[in-house]
Amino acid sequence: MKLRKKSDGVLGVVAMASIVALSLSGCTRDSGGQGGGSGSSPGITDSSITLGITTPLSGATAGPGTCTVAGVTAYFGALNAAGGVKFGDGKTRTVNIKTYDDGYDPQKSLANFQQMVSDNVFAATAGLGTPTNRAFREAAISQKVPQVLVMTGDPLFSDRKQSAWQLGFVPIYQNEGAAFGKLLAASKDQHKVAILSQNDDYGKGYVQGFKDAIKGASNISVVGEQTYEATDTSVDAQLTQLASSGADVVFNAMSITPLAIASLQKAQQIGWKPSWFLPSNTSSPTAILEPGRATAYPGIYSVSFAKAPQSPTFAKDPDVVKFLADLKQYGKYPDMPAFPHCMWSYMVGATLEQAFKNMNAPTRDSFMTSLRNIKGLQAPLMLSGTSVDTTVDGQPAVSSVLVQKYNGKGYATVENFG
């Protein structure tokens, strides 16, 4: 996929706090985006609601960051074009979206949140990244601004006591790591595992989930562990050290796209060809596995809860067909998505719509109450066996995942390792 800078769409936004307003229904926006009355929260009127997204639209994580905007924009663009969303208070509203580029920089994301407050945004949503979402979490709590369905697996965002105004969307890191650990532990063969992880809550969460799942498994031994910083530009030294361990499996808890590609390439260069586990956000077939020449390895595993449009299995799936059409027309994203974040954020749109439908007042309190009472929602693009459930404290909107193996084109769900 080639990222394009466009002047007429969301994908053209690359400057910090530059704003794109989406109103595709032909309805006129309310001036200033103020509340519709003394009983309304900022950012919602009788005819519209305004959401904000701070996410990386430039830099190394611009690919997945751009997807977090495109999917939500596509979902609500289609609804706006059909007349809008009927809320629980009986009013039909269009959904406007303002986007802000943080370049995966926590300081910029905090500044963007402050700008959102000035711009009278009702809620922040869908933004990518643990450090960037953490940067304004406390400010959002103190000002009682919802920061919801964000793209981070940090469990803090789903702890109702500590984060009353937050909710994560994607499975927590521990759940992903545990899913692969369980699969590996169930194997009848002996395996030596090398762990490479990001030295922050992201990497630690994946490793914790994996280690908890293999605890007591006599066929699994961890023979090497290395970490790296999210700001590092190379992990060659770590890979060389891990290769000397003789591991036949690499558990790679990595969030940086260029480093994920370089890791796959480097291991081949030094003649080391283990099986790999990659997190869901850095396992894209086209953006990571193809340039990383992943077919050289005996197996590349990841986890998913979304149908992959690239997979022949889902080429004619009604959800996928509609998603791709909406993404092109309303998300200004003409290419086949290279990152799962495009699908995830489309599901975020569906989850928000469900919350809006059950809001009985135009307030943030009513919104949070409604959002936290969604159960069994089969959002578009969700794989069978997964669903949206926001009712479990400590868990994000999506907590279930399926382990999948790369087949050279896309992924297929597997029940056994090997």
Image (spheres, grey):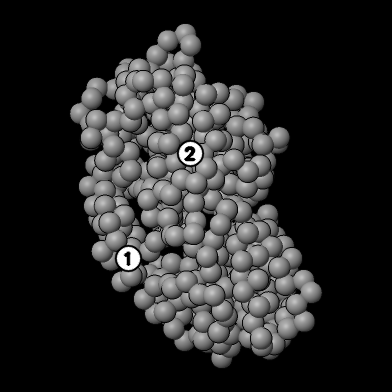
The C terminus lies in quadrant? bottom right
The N terminus lies in quadrant? bottom left
Numbered label tally: 2
Percent x, y of residue 301: 53, 74
Is label 2 or label 1 in front? 1
Percent x, y of residue 213: 71, 68
Q: Residue at x 61, y 70 (%)?
A: 180
Q: Which residue does the numbered mark 2 point to in the structure image? A: 125
Query: The disc labelled 1 sits on which kind of residue?
Result: Phe
Say if residue 197 shows up in the picture.
Answer: yes
Tag 2 secondary structure = strand
Q: Is residue 238 left or right of residue 99?
A: right
Label drawn at residue 76: none
Q: Is residue 276 above or below residue 198?
A: below
Neighbourhood count class around disc 2 (C-alpha, 10 Å): few under 14, some 14–19, many 20 upward: many
Spatial CA span between label 2 and label 1: 28 Å
Q: Which residue does the numbered mark 1 point to in the structure image? A: 314
Neighbourhood count class around disc 1 (C-alpha, 10 Å): few under 14, some 14–19, many 20 upward: some
Q: Is residue 91 left or right of residue 404?
A: left
Dots 2 and 1: beta carbons under 8 Å?
no
